[in-house]
Amino acid sequence: GSEAAGGEQRELLIQRLRAAVHYTTGCLCQDVAEDKGVLFSKQTVAAISEITFRQCENFARDLEMFARHAKRSTITSEDVKLLARRSNSLLKYITQKSDELASSNME
Amino acid sequence: MEEREGGFRKETVERLLRLHFRDGRTRVNGDALLLMAELLKVFVREAAARAARQAQAEDLEKVDIEHVEKVLPQLLLDFV
């Protein structure tokens, strides 16, 4: 039935997203490898990719809650800043990027 | 801020987040997507860097899964 088809589609989407995350993770690990003069095993890249993929669930749910709390259905930069609040350096970095975006939006 | 080669695509981030929303009306605006792409990039780089430092602390040049496992708990606590 259509429910089964929906489930299959979702599974396909999840596979594609996993692959996309894995690809980008590989690129970023390559950068870090060059920076630090190390090699990452394939399993390491896969592990970091999987962890990142799973973290997105927490991020998504938190962001949705933050927006909902502010009585919005659209997630904004403010919600992302809230997400980054636990790490001072991360919050600073995200706020800086947000300011850059805001000023380029005004041009 | 353009999407850089070594980062997550806006479209990918959007789909990654939307996969887990509970409300069908929830959306993410463009700036938030770009910021999340940055956040995810930092997350991956931080995980990789910490695992690398762990391997180096053990006098190894090759970073393996156990190095990720060792740094993961603190990464999750520190990060978000």
Image (cartoon, coloured by chain):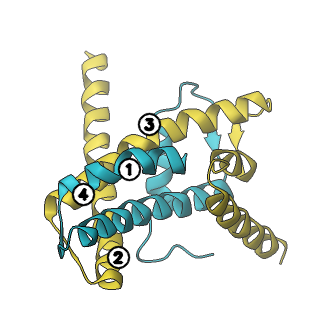
Chain colours: A yellow, B cyan
In what element is the residue under mark 4?
helix
Q: Earlier in the sequence, mark 4 or mark 3?
A: 3
Q: Nearer the viewer, residue A38 or B22?
A: A38
Which residue is located at x 41 percent, y 66 percent? Answer: B45
Q: Nearer the viewer, residue A56 or B9?
A: A56
Judging from the image, mark 1 belongs to the subunit labelled A
**Circles 1 and 4: CB distance less than 8 Å?**
no
Image position, residue A78 (x, y; %): 75, 49
Give the CA separation, mark 2 to mark 3.
Answer: 29 Å
Judging from the image, mark 2 belongs to the subunit labelled A
What kind of residue is marked 1? Thr
- Quadrant position of the N terminus of chain A in the picture: top left
Image position, residue A84 (x, y; %): 63, 51
Judging from the image, mark 3 belongs to the subunit labelled B
Q: Earlier in the sequence, mark 1 or mark 2?
A: 2
**Residue that badge 3 annotates:** B19
**Residue that badge 2 annotates:** A32
